[in-house]
Amino acid sequence: MEILVSRRKLQRRIKRLARQISADHKKSGCILPPVMICILNGSVHFFSDLTRNMTIDAEIDFIRLKSYDGQDNSDGITITKELETDLKGKRVYIVDDICDTGNTIIEALAMVNSRMPLEVKTVTLFRRKNGINLSEFCGFEIGEEWLVGFGFDDFGLKRNEKHVYKL
Protein backbone atom coordinates (compact mmCIF):
# COMPACT_ATOMS: atom_id res chain seq x y z
CA MET A 1 0.00 0.00 0.00
CA GLU A 2 1.14 3.53 -0.74
CA ILE A 3 0.03 6.57 1.28
CA LEU A 4 -2.09 8.83 -0.91
CA VAL A 5 -3.08 11.35 1.79
CA SER A 6 -1.43 11.43 5.21
CA ARG A 7 -3.37 11.76 8.46
CA ARG A 8 -1.87 15.24 8.95
CA LYS A 9 -2.96 16.44 5.52
CA LEU A 10 -6.43 14.92 6.05
CA GLN A 11 -6.85 16.78 9.34
CA ARG A 12 -5.77 20.13 7.89
CA ARG A 13 -8.21 19.83 4.99
CA ILE A 14 -11.06 18.61 7.20
CA LYS A 15 -10.60 21.62 9.52
CA ARG A 16 -10.85 23.96 6.51
CA LEU A 17 -13.99 22.18 5.29
CA ALA A 18 -15.53 22.46 8.77
CA ARG A 19 -14.88 26.22 8.79
CA GLN A 20 -16.32 26.58 5.27
CA ILE A 21 -19.49 24.68 6.17
CA SER A 22 -19.91 26.64 9.41
CA ALA A 23 -19.52 29.92 7.50
CA ASP A 24 -21.91 28.72 4.79
CA HIS A 25 -24.59 27.98 7.35
CA LYS A 26 -24.10 31.28 9.19
CA LYS A 27 -24.31 33.16 5.89
CA SER A 28 -27.67 31.50 5.14
CA GLY A 29 -29.33 33.35 8.01
CA CYS A 30 -31.16 30.19 9.08
CA ILE A 31 -31.74 30.28 12.84
CA LEU A 32 -32.04 26.49 13.16
CA PRO A 33 -28.84 24.49 13.48
CA PRO A 34 -27.99 22.44 10.40
CA VAL A 35 -28.46 18.69 10.29
CA MET A 36 -25.28 16.82 9.41
CA ILE A 37 -26.02 13.40 7.93
CA CYS A 38 -23.31 10.75 7.80
CA ILE A 39 -23.51 8.05 5.14
CA LEU A 40 -22.23 4.94 6.87
CA ASN A 41 -19.88 3.10 6.90
CA GLY A 42 -17.18 4.75 4.82
CA SER A 43 -17.52 8.33 5.99
CA VAL A 44 -17.64 7.71 9.74
CA HIS A 45 -14.08 8.93 10.49
CA PHE A 46 -14.39 11.90 8.14
CA PHE A 47 -17.80 12.82 9.56
CA SER A 48 -16.62 12.59 13.15
CA ASP A 49 -13.59 14.82 12.55
CA LEU A 50 -15.63 17.23 10.41
CA THR A 51 -18.43 17.77 12.92
CA ARG A 52 -16.03 18.12 15.86
CA ASN A 53 -14.22 20.91 14.01
CA MET A 54 -17.34 22.90 13.14
CA THR A 55 -17.72 26.25 14.90
CA ILE A 56 -21.53 26.04 15.12
CA ASP A 57 -23.98 23.69 16.78
CA ALA A 58 -25.41 20.97 14.58
CA GLU A 59 -27.75 18.02 14.81
CA ILE A 60 -26.34 14.76 13.56
CA ASP A 61 -27.93 11.67 12.07
CA PHE A 62 -26.80 8.58 10.21
CA ILE A 63 -28.00 6.62 7.21
CA ARG A 64 -26.52 3.50 5.72
CA LEU A 65 -26.57 3.08 2.00
CA LYS A 66 -24.62 0.08 0.83
CA SER A 67 -23.35 0.27 -2.74
CA TYR A 68 -20.29 -2.00 -2.70
CA ASP A 69 -19.88 -5.72 -2.21
CA GLY A 70 -16.11 -5.96 -1.87
CA GLN A 71 -14.91 -3.86 -4.81
CA ASP A 72 -18.03 -4.44 -6.92
CA ASN A 73 -20.71 -1.71 -7.06
CA SER A 74 -22.84 -3.16 -9.85
CA ASP A 75 -25.82 -4.27 -7.73
CA GLY A 76 -27.23 -0.80 -6.98
CA ILE A 77 -27.95 0.79 -3.61
CA THR A 78 -29.35 -0.98 -0.56
CA ILE A 79 -30.76 1.09 2.34
CA THR A 80 -29.91 -0.57 5.65
CA LYS A 81 -30.48 2.35 8.06
CA GLU A 82 -33.02 5.14 7.68
CA LEU A 83 -32.94 8.71 8.98
CA GLU A 84 -34.43 9.42 12.40
CA THR A 85 -34.27 13.26 12.50
CA ASP A 86 -37.07 15.57 11.38
CA LEU A 87 -35.64 17.58 8.47
CA LYS A 88 -38.62 19.77 7.61
CA GLY A 89 -37.51 23.38 7.15
CA LYS A 90 -33.89 22.67 8.12
CA ARG A 91 -30.63 23.04 6.21
CA VAL A 92 -28.99 19.67 5.66
CA TYR A 93 -25.45 18.63 4.78
CA ILE A 94 -25.05 15.07 3.51
CA VAL A 95 -21.53 13.80 4.27
CA ASP A 96 -19.99 10.94 2.28
CA ASP A 97 -16.48 9.59 1.88
CA ILE A 98 -16.31 9.80 -1.92
CA CYS A 99 -18.32 10.85 -4.95
CA ASP A 100 -17.52 8.04 -7.36
CA THR A 101 -20.45 7.06 -9.59
CA GLY A 102 -22.76 9.47 -7.76
CA ASN A 103 -25.33 6.74 -7.12
CA THR A 104 -25.02 6.79 -3.32
CA ILE A 105 -25.34 10.56 -3.13
CA ILE A 106 -28.31 10.58 -5.53
CA GLU A 107 -30.06 8.00 -3.34
CA ALA A 108 -29.26 10.01 -0.19
CA LEU A 109 -30.55 13.20 -1.82
CA ALA A 110 -33.83 11.45 -2.68
CA MET A 111 -34.21 10.23 0.93
CA VAL A 112 -33.44 13.65 2.38
CA ASN A 113 -35.50 15.72 -0.08
CA SER A 114 -38.57 13.56 0.59
CA ARG A 115 -38.52 14.97 4.15
CA MET A 116 -38.92 18.60 2.97
CA PRO A 117 -35.71 20.28 4.17
CA LEU A 118 -35.13 23.96 3.51
CA GLU A 119 -31.89 23.27 1.63
CA VAL A 120 -29.54 20.33 1.05
CA LYS A 121 -25.82 20.41 0.31
CA THR A 122 -23.34 17.60 -0.11
CA VAL A 123 -19.88 17.17 1.39
CA THR A 124 -17.35 14.55 0.31
CA LEU A 125 -13.80 13.88 1.36
CA PHE A 126 -12.86 12.76 -2.16
CA ARG A 127 -14.24 12.95 -5.68
CA ARG A 128 -12.97 11.51 -8.94
CA LYS A 129 -11.34 14.04 -11.29
CA ASN A 130 -13.13 12.62 -14.31
CA GLY A 131 -16.26 11.51 -12.48
CA ILE A 132 -19.62 13.01 -11.72
CA ASN A 133 -19.38 15.99 -9.36
CA LEU A 134 -22.22 16.14 -6.86
CA SER A 135 -20.34 17.64 -3.91
CA GLU A 136 -20.59 21.31 -3.05
CA PHE A 137 -17.80 20.85 -0.50
CA CYS A 138 -14.93 18.50 -1.31
CA GLY A 139 -11.61 17.75 0.32
CA PHE A 140 -9.56 16.19 -2.47
CA GLU A 141 -9.78 15.17 -6.11
CA ILE A 142 -8.27 11.85 -7.13
CA GLY A 143 -7.91 9.61 -10.17
CA GLU A 144 -9.12 6.03 -10.39
CA GLU A 145 -7.19 4.62 -7.41
CA TRP A 146 -8.87 2.16 -5.06
CA LEU A 147 -8.66 3.72 -1.58
CA VAL A 148 -8.30 2.10 1.83
CA GLY A 149 -7.93 3.56 5.30
CA PHE A 150 -9.66 6.40 7.13
CA GLY A 151 -13.04 4.74 6.52
CA PHE A 152 -12.35 3.27 3.09
CA ASP A 153 -12.28 -0.51 3.10
CA ASP A 154 -11.02 -3.50 1.20
CA PHE A 155 -13.62 -6.26 1.66
CA GLY A 156 -14.62 -4.78 5.04
CA LEU A 157 -11.07 -4.37 6.36
CA LYS A 158 -8.54 -1.51 6.69
CA ARG A 159 -11.15 1.17 7.56
CA ASN A 160 -9.26 1.91 10.79
CA GLU A 161 -5.97 2.90 9.11
CA LYS A 162 -4.94 6.49 9.97
CA HIS A 163 -3.93 7.50 6.46
CA VAL A 164 -5.66 7.09 3.09
CA TYR A 165 -3.76 4.61 0.97
CA LYS A 166 -4.08 3.66 -2.66
CA LEU A 167 -3.92 0.02 -3.69
Image (cartoon, grey):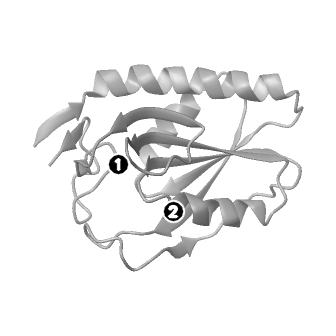
Q: Earlier in the sequence, mark 2 or mark 1?
A: 2
- Dot 1 surroundings within 10 Å: few (below 14), some, or many (20 or more)? many
In three-dimensional space, the C-alpha distance between marks 2 and 1, rounded to whole angstroms, equals: 16 Å
Q: Is residue 84 visible?
A: no
Whole-percent x, y for residue 40 in the image: 48, 58
Q: Amino acid at mark 2?
A: Thr
Work out whether 97 lies above or below 111: above
Q: Which residue is denoted by mark 2 in the rendering?
A: 104
Work out whether 160 lies above or below 83: above
Q: Amino acid at mark 1?
A: Gly
- Residue at the image point whose x is 17% and y is 34% from the top: 3
Of tags 2 and 1, which is closer to the observer? 2
Q: In the orientation shown, which residue stands out farthest toward the bottom?
A: 75
Residue 151: mark: 1
Q: Is residue 109 left or right of residue 8?
A: right
Q: Are marks 2 and 1 in contact (CB under 8 Å)?
A: no
* Badge 2 element: helix
Whole-percent x, y for residue 153 in the image: 27, 56
* Badge 1 element: loop
Whole-percent x, y for residue 59 in the image: 71, 43
Whole-percent x, y for residue 33 in the image: 79, 36
